[in-house]
Image (cartoon, rainbow, N blue to C red):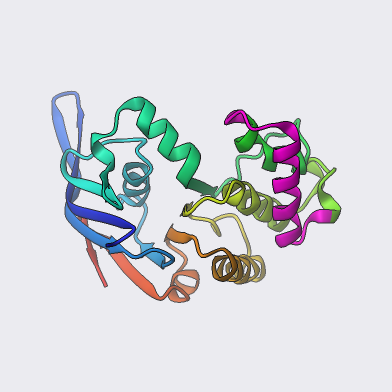
Amino acid sequence: MPNLGISNVGKIFESDGNSTRVLDKLNLSVETGSIVAIEGASGSGKSTLLNLIATIDTPSTGKISYGDKILSQFSTREKEKFRAQNLGFIFQHYCLLPDFSVLENVMMPLLICKHSWSFALEKSRVLLDLVGLDNRKSHFPSQISGGEMARVGVARALVGEKDLVLADEPTGNLDKSNSEKLADLLWSLQQKLNFTLIIVTHDRDFAARAPQRYQLSSGNLAQ
């Protein structure tokens, strides 16, 4: 059974009496522990697709399943639990909290889920060591480089042993050298931790490294 199944999914946005179809009868099966890259131009629906997978938004048609559960049928509480327990997010703009240290930023998802301080501290230190930032844990986001901020974002996404990681243009703010380093890191961590990784990007070099690579155009996916 696929870890994630997207079946005939469509998404229509309504505004001022006008309908805009962003996704149309989209299908995708992702096996547990896979790395999938989805390329597409700006406005092609990449972020919309991630929002649907993350249960932040709901499909207009079709269904999205995770294991034997249909995500689009979840209640608000079930969606919140799914995101907290299963999902990690990697953002283009990192979204680090400026008034908190690197370590505290990584701890935050666990603290929000009401884990103990000691538990969050232990798990976060392990992740920061894995991404090579143990020596930067007391620094603030303004005191580290863009490449280091990207690695903090990866650590925060993975803390709590998340099994599905969604990355939205993770190299969008990085130069070529740091993009390659981030890709090396993600691939290495995925091999160690066996999470499922879905990346949406317009970075062709980054996408080319993924075993499964798709193009999103006119609301549909093609390999």
User: In which quarter of the view is residue 37 placed?
Assistant: bottom left
- Residue at 36% over, 72% down: 212
Left or right? Give the position of 38 relative to 119: left
Q: Quadrant where the N terminus lies?
A: bottom left
What percent of the width, then of the height, locates residue 72? 25, 38
- Residue at 50% over, 70% down: 206
Residue 141 appears in the picture as rendered: no
Name the residue nearer the viewer: 154 or 22: 154
Q: Magenta segment range?
A: 112-134
- Residue at 26% over, 36% down: 58
What percent of the width, then of the height, locates residue 193? 57, 63
User: In which quarter of the view is residue 93 placed?
Assistant: top right
| Depicted 89 relative to depicted 13: above or below | below
Residue 5 appears in the picture as rendered: yes
- Residue at 41% over, 67% down: 34
Left or right? Give the position of 35 relative to 12: right
Left or right? Give the position of 223 relative to 99: left
